[in-house]
Image (cartoon, rainbow, N blue to C red):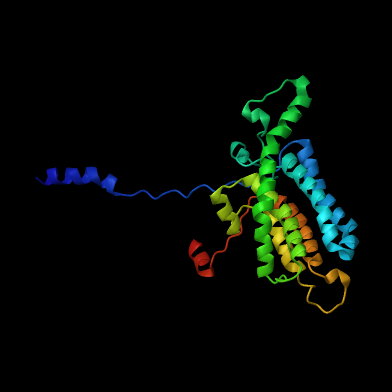
């Protein structure tokens, strides 16, 4: 009788024991494409943006509304070339492995979808590649204008921008910041809710896209410091220093996010007590 009563218990024991669930794999960082153009332009793009800021800075100080409005087409073009030429569209990064230097080992593009071309049809292959990336770029640009720009304009007001005046300047400042930060994010990540929760929670692994967005916000934050100072300088007017800081922060964030030793790392906000418990 004893042996008969133990047998069922031994058979049911494994089913009653719950195995610990494995942690869900994190989304990989976004890598710069491995093509020669992507690597070259990814380095030239920050320099071009800073050159544009330096060249037109005096015009922005003299007439900020007209100048910021006329600069938007240039910024859209530069950002479109950057995202289409250097970044994989949303979903493409899942099919390629990433390396420590921020490049993809597996080619993403028309070949991944079966649009393989012969060696003599490089021109047609390039056109197909542009067409393949144009649709997500246009969709990303549309979402940037319709969603990201009003959101950033509201955040600017909440953080101290004039509420009853300077409406055009606030909207233009938000548009520039959205094109810098949100356009590449939307192009690379689409509307994946899990990734956007990581973005809003500042828990994304470091890369050029996330670093540029974070640098834009931090640069704009520090750029607002000179505005209330009583120096009586024309360049202190709102939102000149905010946008200048946003551009500088974007460039620094891009470069730092791609740097070896930083790429793929996460910001970890762990309390001191919890950190001590993790130490063996």
Instruction: Say above or below: 109 vs 268.
Output: above
Question: Residue at 82% across / 49% down in the picture?
Answer: 74
Instruction: Say above or below: 32 vs 235.
Output: above
Q: Nearer the viewer, residue 69 or 80?
A: 69
Q: Position of residue 42 (x, y in %)?
A: 77, 45
Q: Position of residue 266 (x, y in %)?
A: 61, 55
In the rendered image, which quarter contains the N terminus? top left
Report whether residue 189 is seen.
yes
Extreme bottom residue here? 230
Extreme left residue here? 1
- In the displayed structure image, the side of residue 235 where residue 99 appears, left or right: left
Report whether residue 207 is seen.
no
Image quadrant in which you'd find residue 232: bottom right
Question: Residue at 62% across / 40% down in the picture?
Answer: 93
Q: Nearer the viewer, residue 196 or 23?
A: 196
Q: Position of residue 196 (x, y in %)?
A: 58, 53
Instruction: Say above or below: 49 vs 235.
Output: above
Q: How many marks overall?
A: 0
Image quadrant in which you'd find residue 116: top right
Question: Residue at 69% across / 37% down in the picture?
Answer: 133
Image quadrant in which you'd find residue 57: bottom right
Question: Residue at 85% across / 59% down in the picture?
Answer: 66
Q: Position of residue 260 (x, y in %)?
A: 71, 50
């Amino acid at each position: 009788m004893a042996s008969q009563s133990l047998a069922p218990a031994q058979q049911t024991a494994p089913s009653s024991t719950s195995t610990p669930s494995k942690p869900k794999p994190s989304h990989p960082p976004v890598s710069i494409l491995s093509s020669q153009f992507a690597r070259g332009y990814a380095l030239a793009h920050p320099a071009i943006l800073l050159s544009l800021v330096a060249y037109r800075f005096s015009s922005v100080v003299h007439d900020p509304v007209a100048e910021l409005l006329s600069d938007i087409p240039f910024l859209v073009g530069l950002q479109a070339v950057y995202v289409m030429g250097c970044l994989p569209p949303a979903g493409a990064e899942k099919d390629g492995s990433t390396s420590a230097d921020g490049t993809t080992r597996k080619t993403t593009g028309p070949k991944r979808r079966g649009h393989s071309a012969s060696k003599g049809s490089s021109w047609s292959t390039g056109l197909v590649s542009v067409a393949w990336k144009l649709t997500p770029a246009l969709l990303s640009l549309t979402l940037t204008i319709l969603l990201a720009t009003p959101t950033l304009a509201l955040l600017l007001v909440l953080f101290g921008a004039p509420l009853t005046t300077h409406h055009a300047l606030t909207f233009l400042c938000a548009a520039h910041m959205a094109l810098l930060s949100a356009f590449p994010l939307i192009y690379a990540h689409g509307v994946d809710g899990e990734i956007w929760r990581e973005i809003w929670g500042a828990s994304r692994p470091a890369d050029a896209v996330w670093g540029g967005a974070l640098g834009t916000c931090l640069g704009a934050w520090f750029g607002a410091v000179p505005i209330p100072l009583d120096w009586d300088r024309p360049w202190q007017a709102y939102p000149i220093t905010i946008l200048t800081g946003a551009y500088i922060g974007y460039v620094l964030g891009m470069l730092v996010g791609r740097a070896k030793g930083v790429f793929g790392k996460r910001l970890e906000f762990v309390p001191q007590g919890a950190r001590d418990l993790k130490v063996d």
